[in-house]
Image (spheres, rainbow, N blue to C red):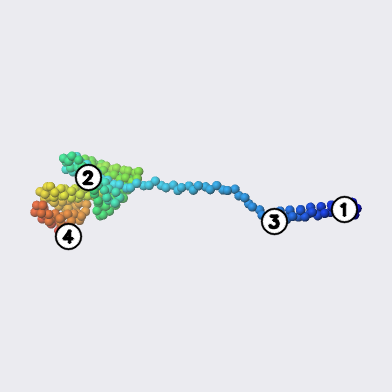
C-alpha cells in the first residue's frame, strides 16, 4: 500500500472516532436531570397574641358615720358574691369591731339590682339633695372594678335607688349588730337580753332588718336558753311565732 492511501485511512479512522465521541457527549447531555435549587426561606417567628389586662375583682362598700350616735361608725365591704366583712364602732369603744359578713341571697339580689340601676361607675350624678341634714350622719357608697373607682357621699338624697341601697346596708348592719350584741349578752351580760329583744321587735315593726327569716334558728335557741331571764325566753318564743307565720 502506498503512503498516500495509508494516510487517507488514518484520517478516516480519526474522523469516525471523533464522531462517536461527539454523539456520546450529546446523549449524556440530553439525558441529564435538572435540579431546581431553592434558597432556604427564613421562617417568620409567630407573634404572640396580645392579651388584654386582667380586670380586677369588683368590690362594694357602704359607710355610715355620725360621731354622737350610739353606733358612730359602720363600714360594710363585700365582693361580687356578697361575702365580706363589717366594721363598727360604738360610743366608748377603744377600737372598732371587725367581723365576717355574708349577705343573704335575697339581700344580695336586692343590693346588686340597686347598684346596677345606679350604673354607679358610669355615672357622675350627685346623690346629695339640695337640703342638708348633717344631723342624720354621712353615708358613702364606694365601688371598685379593676382600676376604676368611685365614691359618692351624701347625708340625704332624693334619688330613690341611692336611698334604697343605703337602706339595705343599714338593715344588714342592724341585723348583724343585734346578733353580735345578743351573743355577748348570752355569755357575760344575760340581763341585757330583754332590751335587745325589744330592739329587735322594733326593727321588725319598722322593716329595719335585712333578712328576718335568718334569725329564726337564733330565736328558737334563745327561747330555750335557761341562762337567760324568763322574759327573754318568752319574748323570743313570741317572735318565733310571728316570723313563722
Residue 31 tag number: 3
Which callout, 1 or 3, points to the residue nearer the camera? 1
- Residue identifier under label 4: 245
Mark with earlier residue (2, 1): 1
- The reply to whether dot 2 and dot 1 touch (C-beta < 8 Å) is no
* Callout 3 touching callout 4 (CB < 8 Å): no
- Give the foreground label among 4 and 2: 2
Q: Which mark is residue 206?
A: none
Circles 4 and 2: CB distance less than 8 Å? no
Q: Earlier in the sequence, mark 4 or mark 2?
A: 2
Front residue of this view, candidates 218 and 211: 218
Disc 2 on helix, strand or loop?
A: strand
Q: Which mark sits nearer the N-terminus, 3 or 4? A: 3
Quadrant of the snapshot with the N terminus: bottom right
The nearer-to-camera label among 3 and 4 is: 3
For the point 18% across and 48% down, the residue is 180
The residue tagged 2 is 98
**Foreground: disc 2 or disc 1:** 1
Alpha carbon of mark 1 to alpha carbon of mark 3: how far? 39 Å
Q: Residues within 10 Å of mark 2 (few under 14, many from 20)?
A: some
Amino acid at each position: 500500500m502506498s503512503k498516500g492511501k495509508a494516510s487517507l485511512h488514518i484520517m478516516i479512522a480519526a474522523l469516525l472516532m471523533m464522531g462517536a465521541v461527539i454523539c456520546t457527549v450529546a446523549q449524556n447531555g440530553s439525558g441529564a436531570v435538572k435540579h431546581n435549587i431553592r434558597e432556604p426561606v427564613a421562617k417568620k417567628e409567630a407573634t404572640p397574641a396580645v392579651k388584654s389586662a386582667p380586670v380586677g375583682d369588683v368590690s362594694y362598700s357602704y359607710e355610715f358615720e355620725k360621731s354622737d350616735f350610739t353606733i358612730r361608725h359602720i363600714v360594710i365591704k363585700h365582693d361580687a358574691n356578697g361575702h365580706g366583712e363589717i366594721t363598727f364602732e360604738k360610743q366608748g369603744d377603744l377600737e372598732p369591731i371587725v367581723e365576717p359578713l355574708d349577705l343573704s341571697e335575697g339581700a344580695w339580689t336586692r343590693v346588686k339590682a340597686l347598684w346596677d340601676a345606679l350604673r354607679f361607675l358610669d355615672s357622675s350624678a350627685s346623690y346629695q339633695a339640695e337640703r342638708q341634714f348633717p344631723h342624720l350622719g354621712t353615708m358613702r357608697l364606694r365601688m371598685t372594678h379593676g382600676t376604676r373607682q368611685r365614691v359618692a357621699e351624701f347625708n340625704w338624697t332624693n334619688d330613690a335607688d341611692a336611698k334604697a341601697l343605703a337602706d339595705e346596708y343599714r338593715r344588714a348592719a342592724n341585723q348583724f349588730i343585734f346578733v353580735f350584741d345578743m351573743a355577748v349578752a348570752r355569755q357575760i351580760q344575760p340581763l341585757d337580753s330583754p332590751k335587745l329583744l325589744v330592739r329587735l321587735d322594733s326593727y321588725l315593726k319598722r322593716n329595719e332588718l335585712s333578712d328576718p327569716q335568718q334569725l329564726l334558728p337564733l330565736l328558737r335557741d334563745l327561747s330555750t336558753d335557761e341562762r337567760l331571764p324568763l322574759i327573754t325566753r318568752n319574748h323570743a318564743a313570741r317572735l318565733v311565732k310571728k316570723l313563722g307565720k
